[in-house]
Image (tube, grey):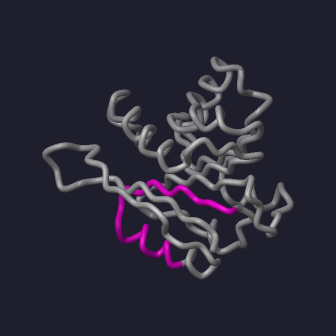
Amino acid sequence: SSFTQTNPQLNSQMIKIIKSFLGQHRFSEIVEFGCGVGNFTLFLSEITSRMVVIENDLRNLIPLRQNLQNHALGQQVSIFENLKHYFSSIKIDTNASADKLYFVNPARSGVGSLFDHPLGASQVVYVSCYMDSFLVDAIKLENQGFKLEKITLFDQFPHSEHFEIISLFKRT
């Protein structure tokens, strides 16, 4: 694929941070954008009974489907190959639900049009590798009534200038 996490240990450390942000909260539904091969999908499936995943990079779909099959998550997870397909296939619930989470881990370009539509969720976890697109998307979230609650920088590529932003937005 075009990108995946650098190694399992760093991926596990990122998951620990995200879990600390979410606490013991369970969600009725999680919408994950930029799921890749399922690095975060697998742990997110433990805190929900229903997931929708959106992956724009078609090279990730084969290993993603294999990971879901290997972990018996095929019935729990619906896969959409891009935002257009997602928006045309579902009825978007614009009512904020305390039980719904958006989890986004986009490419450098950000989430595209995802935040241009009302999000029917109370929380958004945003993992970003690029500050510029993160800021553009954070403004869109703020305009929808979300507030940045927690943020941390994660050194995923030691000895480089690159870092990941792990953040939690909550609807005010």
- The answer to which image quadrant residue 94 occupies is bottom right
Out of 11 and 47, give the one closest to the viewer.
47
- The answer to which image quadrant residue 13 occupies is top left
The residue range painted magenta reads 122-139
- Residue at the far top: name it: 70
Picture coordinates of residue 115, whole percent (x, y): 62, 70
Side of 95 where 41 appears, left or right: left
Side of 135 where 89 appears, left or right: right
Position of residue 135 relative to residue 29, above or below, is: below
- Residue at the far right: name it: 91
Residue at 73%, 36% in the rendered image: 77
Picture coordinates of residue 105, whole percent (x, y): 50, 52
Out of 18 and 56, give the one closest to the viewer.
18
Question: Is 103 a magenta residue?
Answer: no
Residue at 65%, 74% in the rendered image: 116
Position of residue 99 relative to residue 79, above or below, is: below
Picture coordinates of residue 74, whole percent (x, y): 75, 27
Out of 51 and 55, give the one closest to the viewer.
51
Side of 65 where 8 appears, left or right: left
- Residue at the far left: name it: 159
